[in-house]
Image (cartoon, rainbow, N blue to C red):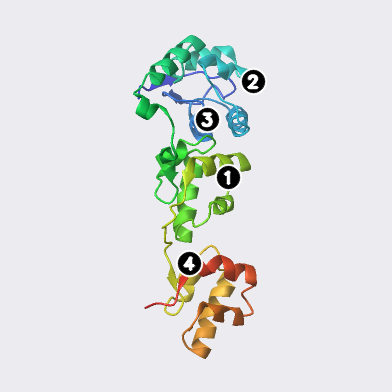
């Protein structure tokens, strides 16, 4: 990336030191926009615009965002990774259209596996930036993998638009088997590390096991008063009795 110092920027303190780098306003995170010299309000406004389904098709579309000064825009213009005009956009789309017919039509295989996706794949989904992609992976690892698409609603910071688009652009393999926790050998800390089990629930499981011996069936969890039915249903696919 070409980086160029920017000494003055609209809406930011004159003393702020800023560097310019190439960016796509459709995907740049709030933090990246701020690093480019956008004020917090402007960066947030752009993010809200995208979350509501707004898209920047050409460079000057950025000027549609209320509060962006034209002089600031022209300082950024060379670094915006969008076409200058809609004609250039149509030309680029036309070149893509003339790709071999076998690859020109999207098929279900164009979707990505939600349980194997890395941050770069997740960030290709509109509304998901660096932080959100990291949160998705962190929550996925804590769970042991997604077994139902509606679980992405549980990821902190994902709004309904991002959830819907991620649901449309990814899938969960039918043969996916989540990482499980051995309910007969795991200690309290390991049990409580799962998002569906509180510290109190983990303590109760270990205490019950100490008093009654190993669990013969997962159904025995219903004997533990600290576990309600909803929790049992959610956690069951992530538990195993061992060999």
Image-based side of 50 in relation to 175, left or right: right
Q: Which residue is mark 3?
A: 34
Q: Nearer the viewer, residue 125 or 97?
A: 97
User: Alpha-carbon distance for marks 4 and 1?
Assistant: 23 Å
How far across and down, in percent of the image, does residue 141 sit? 44, 57
Q: Reading the chain from its start, which is encountered first: label 4 or label 1?
A: 1
Image-based side of 157 in relation to 138, left or right: right
Q: Is residue 204 visible?
A: no
Q: Which mark is residue 21?
A: none
Q: Nearer the viewer, residue 155 or 231?
A: 231
Circle 1: element type: loop
Q: Reading the chain from its start, which is encountered first: label 4 or label 2?
A: 2
Q: Reading the chain from its start, which is encountered first: label 3 or label 2?
A: 3
* Residue 46 image-quadrant placement: top right
Q: Which residue is mark 2?
A: 67
Q: Which residue is mark 4?
A: 238
Q: Which residue is mark 1?
A: 158
User: Alpha-carbon distance for marks 4 and 3?
Assistant: 40 Å
Up/down of 44 relative to 156, above or below: above
Q: Residue at x 47, y 55 (%)?
A: 140
Q: Reading the chain from its start, which is encountered first: label 4 or label 3?
A: 3
Circle 1 packing at 10 Å, graded few (<14), some (14-19), many (20+), is some
Observer-side mark, 2 or 1, equals 1
Circle 4: element type: helix
Q: Reading the chain from its start, which is encountered first: label 2 or label 1?
A: 2
Circle 3 packing at 10 Å, graded few (<14), some (14-19), many (20+), is some
Observer-side mark, 4 or 2, equals 4
Circle 4 packing at 10 Å, graded few (<14), some (14-19), many (20+), is many
User: Alpha-carbon distance for marks 3 and 2?
Assistant: 14 Å
User: Alpha-carbon distance for marks 4 and 2?
Assistant: 49 Å
């Amino acid at each position: 990336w070409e980086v160029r110092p920017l000494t003055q920027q609209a809406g930011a303190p004159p003393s702020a030191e800023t560097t310019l780098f190439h960016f796509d306003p459709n995907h740049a995170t709030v933090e990246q926009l701020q690093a480019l010299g956008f004020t917090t309000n402007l960066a947030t406004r752009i993010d809200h615009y995208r979350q509501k389904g707004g898209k920047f098709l050409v460079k000057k579309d950025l000027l549609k965002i209320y509060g962006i000064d034209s002089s600031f825009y022209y300082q950024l213009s060379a670094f915006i990774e969008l076409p200058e005009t809609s004609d250039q956009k149509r030309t680029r789309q036309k070149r893509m259209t003339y790709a071999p017919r076998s690859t020109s039509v999207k098929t279900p295989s164009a979707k990505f596996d939600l349980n194997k996706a890395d941050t770069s794949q997740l960030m290709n989904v509109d509304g998901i930036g660096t932080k959100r992609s990291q949160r998705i992976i962190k929550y996925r690892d804590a769970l042991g993998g997604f077994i139902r698409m509606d679980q992405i609603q549980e990821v902190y910071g994902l709004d309904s638009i991002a959830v819907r688009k991620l649901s449309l652009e990814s899938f969960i393999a039918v043969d996916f088997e989540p990482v499980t926790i051995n309910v007969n050998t795991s200690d309290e800390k390991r049990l409580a590390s799962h998002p569906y089990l509180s510290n109190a629930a983990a303590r109760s499981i270990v205490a019950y096991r100490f008093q009654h011996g190993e669990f013969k069936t997962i159904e025995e969890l219903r004997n533990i008063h600290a576990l309600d039915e909803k929790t049992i249903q959610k956690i069951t696919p992530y538990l195993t009795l061992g060999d």
